């Protein structure tokens, strides 16, 4: 008992040691690991449960449709990420009223935009044959049209309500955001568990549950936070200033184009795979991605508090702290290679335990997805640093290059190598983005960035 107490005191001392900004980050990382650990467990249980509920082919159709709907996230026009930086800057300088104006204005603009987008989608949806787009049987066309409307409706609501997560993360408390995200997953898992035992497999039911669960939790968390901890930042009509939108958009417009490019490079993979193969191939890729993605998710937990922390540090010119943090995070990112190799070596046993024999995952797919995950970790780290600093022009250019070249290259390699070829294409552009972002971060931190490197 005395040993455990001494260890607890020792660990507590390590957590509370260092700069206030670092201590806050360490506390959030520790809390996030516990919360995200549960989230990972829930998501892993959700995969076989969902596959058994609707079968592997329909699960692939669901994944592809979800990816397509996610493309419309660019309609936030960069306001989410723009708000994150401007809110942090306003709070760091003690201008709480300005922070509230930014929050209120962002909500107002997102409500206007996504109501318009929803009405436009409702009209266009009547003329879309989703069975062709998703490479599904023609007799599913009517069902898929209804499913698309359900999924898109919840998506539009989520794009508005998720602003509370942006505010929480900008306040350097990502663990709280992770907690509410986990509750949404848990609610979905419980409802799908009930559906599995009470209904026959239905994409409509699945779409409704997976859309409703996060919306419900976001709505409750918004009421909770704006009534208590963030009461001074709560959105209000009288604090809406559309003239302040240009401040958010100054950096937000760059994030907007990066979001579009991000969608093209990373979110089109499911659509390309389903058309060069079958919806079942999408299931294979996504299972491998979820398995290896444990590494990316864990690393994301580690780096998530540092975007806003770096914004704060850069605002007050604390370069020394930024350099120390970057050095430590880069070392950890390189050590992830060992973890990915281990996961690859035990993947056959892991898949068997996780999903049984319902889907067979080729070793070649697991291997290339592992490489892809390592590159995504490096991209996430260095772009996170640049996002926090607000110097994203080089990132924008490299992403736009990927936007132009990824789809034709992915289709070409996909026809030659199947799923592996599509992921090789995405990996190539991850490597390009990583290389340029590392160079830019080094130039900025050593105060050698000039011209485009400093924008």
Image: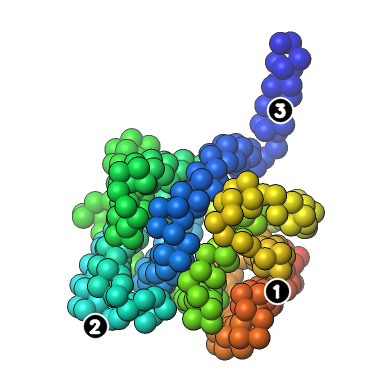
Q: Is residue 59 left or right of residue 6?
A: left
Residue identified by numbered label 1? 431
Q: Label for residue 11?
A: 3
Give the Cα distance between marks 1 and 2. Answer: 39 Å
Residue located at (55% from left, 43% from top): 41
Quick check: can you spot residue 167? no
Q: Is residue 243 left or right of residue 10?
A: left
- Circle 3 sits in a helix, a strand or a loop, which is it? helix
Residue identified by numbered label 2? 127
Name the image quarter holding the C terminus. bottom right
Query: Is tag 2's residue or tag 3's residue first in the polypeptide sequence?
Result: 3
Check the image and report above or below for 322 versus 241: above
Q: Name the one closer to the observer, 375 or 24.
A: 375
The image position of residue 148, as x and y in percent, is: 30, 68
- Residue furthest toward the top? 2
Q: How is colour applied across the structure in the image?
A: rainbow
The image position of residue 437, as x and y in percent, is: 68, 71
Quick check: can you spot residue 285? yes
- Circle 1 sits in a helix, a strand or a loop, which is it? helix
Residue located at (48% from left, 62% from top): 56
The image position of residue 201, as x and y in percent, is: 35, 55
Name the image quarter holding the N terminus. top right
Mark 2 or 3: in front is 2
Give the Cα distance between marks 3 and 1. Answer: 37 Å
Q: Name the one closer to the observer, 221 or 71.
A: 71
């Amino acid at each position: 008992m005395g040993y455990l107490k001494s260890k607890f005191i020792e660990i507590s001392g390590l957590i509370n040691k260092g700069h206030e900004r670092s201590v806050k980050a360490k506390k959030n990382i520790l809390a996030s690991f516990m919360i995200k650990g549960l989230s990972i467990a829930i998501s892993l249980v959700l995969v076989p449960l969902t596959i058994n509920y609707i079968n592997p082919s329909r699960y692939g159709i669901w994944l592809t449709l979800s990816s397509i709907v996610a493309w419309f996230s660019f309609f936030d026009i960069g306001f989410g990420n723009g708000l994150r930086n401007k809110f942090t800057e306003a709070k760091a300088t003690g201008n709480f009223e300005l922070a509230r104006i930014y929050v209120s204005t962002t909500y107002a603009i997102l409500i206007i935009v996504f109501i318009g987008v929803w009405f436009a989608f409702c009209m266009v949806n009547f003329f879309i044959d989703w069975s062709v787009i998703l490479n599904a049987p023609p007799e599913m066309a009517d069902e898929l049209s209804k499913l698309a409307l359900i999924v898109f409706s919840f998506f539009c609501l989520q794009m508005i309500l998720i602003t509370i997560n942006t505010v929480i993360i900008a306040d350097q408390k990502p663990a709280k955001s992770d907690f509410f995200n986990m509750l949404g997953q848990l609610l979905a898992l419980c409802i799908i568990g009930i559906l599995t035992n009470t209904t026959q497999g239905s994409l409509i039911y699945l779409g409704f549950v997976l859309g409703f669960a996060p919306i419900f939790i976001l709505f409750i968390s918004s009421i909770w936070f704006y009534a208590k901890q963030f009461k001074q930042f709560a959105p209000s009509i009288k604090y809406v200033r559309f003239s302040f939108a240009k401040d958010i958009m100054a950096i937000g417009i760059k994030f907007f184009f990066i979001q579009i490019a991000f969608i093209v490079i990373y979110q089109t993979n499911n659509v390309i795979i389903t058309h060069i193969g079958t919806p079942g191939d999408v299931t294979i890729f996504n299972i491998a991605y979820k398995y290896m993605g444990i590494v990316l998710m864990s690393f994301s937990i580690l780096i998530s508090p540092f975007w806003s922390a770096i914004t704060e540090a850069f605002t007050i010119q604390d370069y020394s702290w930024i350099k120390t943090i970057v050095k430590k995070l880069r070392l950890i990112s390189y050590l992830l290679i060992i973890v990915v190799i281990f996961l690859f070596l035990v993947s056959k046993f892991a898949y068997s335990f996780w999903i049984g024999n319902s889907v067979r995952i080729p070793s070649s797919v697991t291997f290339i997805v592992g490489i892809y995950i390592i590159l995504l970790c490096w991209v996430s780290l260095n772009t996170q640093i640049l996002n926090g600093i607000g110097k994203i022009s080089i990132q924008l250019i490299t992403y736009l290059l990927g936007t132009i070249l990824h789809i034709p290259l992915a289709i070409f390699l996909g026809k030659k190598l199947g799923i592996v070829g599509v992921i090789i294409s995405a990996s190539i552009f991850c490597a390009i983005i990583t290389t340029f972002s590392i160079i830019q971060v080094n130039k900025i931190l050593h105060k050698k960035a000039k011209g485009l490197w400093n924008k």
